[in-house]
Amino acid sequence: MRLGGFAACALVACGTSVAAAEAIGWSSIVVPRFGTRAEIPTSIFIHQRDPDNGDGVTLKATDGARLLIYGSWYDEDGRTPTQRWVWLRRAEPLRYAHVNYLRTGKDFLVVSGTIGATEFYERYRFDDPSGARHALIFEYPKGKIAKYRPLVSRISASLSFSRPMQ
């Protein structure tokens, strides 16, 4: 696998070498119930026990980073990404008290910020014709920004969906 010029520059700027980034083992993970998919660095994250309802997966790293990938029917009432953001902010005001990036579009919501000593990044996709919503939540220690920020871009860009497996 080769990294494009922009990705390589981003990795160097964040203090992660291109060789180290290419050495990370990547694999696709799928949430069968919703068809939610993402690429994850398998050399960093350890798959934890999945929830009994099959909504998603939780992965953890030895340094405290956590990655959740899941699907849901939460917005079956037709919430737009902006309405979802308003709902999230009201539902968890402490979590979203220190947002440093927020972007909504016709079919997505991205929010990042800090909670104490933790950085977080969340991406929600609203473009699945089945009505399912696909999401990832990535949390990592502030002291590990150089390690994780380059990975956030790749994981986020890989968030996709396919037909759920029945």
Image (cartoon, rainbow, N blue to C red):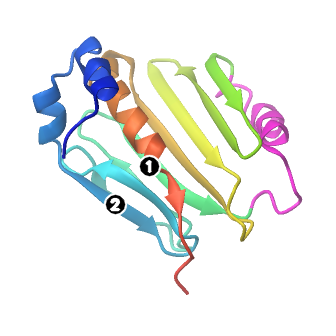
> In terms of depth relative to the viewer, which is nearer, 115 or 152?
152
| Circle 1 residues within 10 Å: few <14, some 14–19, many ≥20 | some
**Vertical order, 29 against 93 (above or below):** below
Mark found first going from the N terminus, 2 or 1? 2
In the picture as drawn, the residue positioned furthest to the bottom comes out as 166
Residue 57 visible from this viewpoint: no
| Residues in magenta, as a range | 74-96
Instruction: Using the image, tell me which numbered label, if any, was put on residue 28.
Output: 2
Label 2's element? strand
Q: Position of residue 28 (x, y in %)?
A: 34, 60
Residue 47 visible from this viewpoint: yes
In the picture as drawn, the residue positioned furthest to the front comes out as 5
Does 103 appear in magenta? no
Residue drawn at the location 46% of the way across and 61% of the way down: 37
Q: Position of residue 117 (x, y in %)?
A: 44, 18
**Vertical order, 13 against 50 (above or below):** above
> In terms of depth relative to the viewer, which is nearer, 126 or 60?
126
The amino acid type found where label 2 is placed reads Ser
Marks 2/1 in contact by CB < 8 Å: the verdict is: yes
The residue to which callout 1 is attached is 158
Q: Position of residue 63 (x, y in %)?
A: 26, 33
> In terms of depth relative to the viewer, which is nearer, 39 or 42?
39
Residue drawn at the location 50% of the way across and 29% of the way down: 120
Does 94 appear in magenta? yes
**Vertical order, 130 against 28 (above or below):** below
Q: Position of residue 101 (x, y in %)?
A: 62, 20
Quadrant of the image occupied by residue 47 = bottom left
Residue drawn at the location 50% of the way across and 67% of the way down: 51
Quadrant of the image occupied by residue 21 = top left
Quadrant of the image occupied by residue 88 = top right
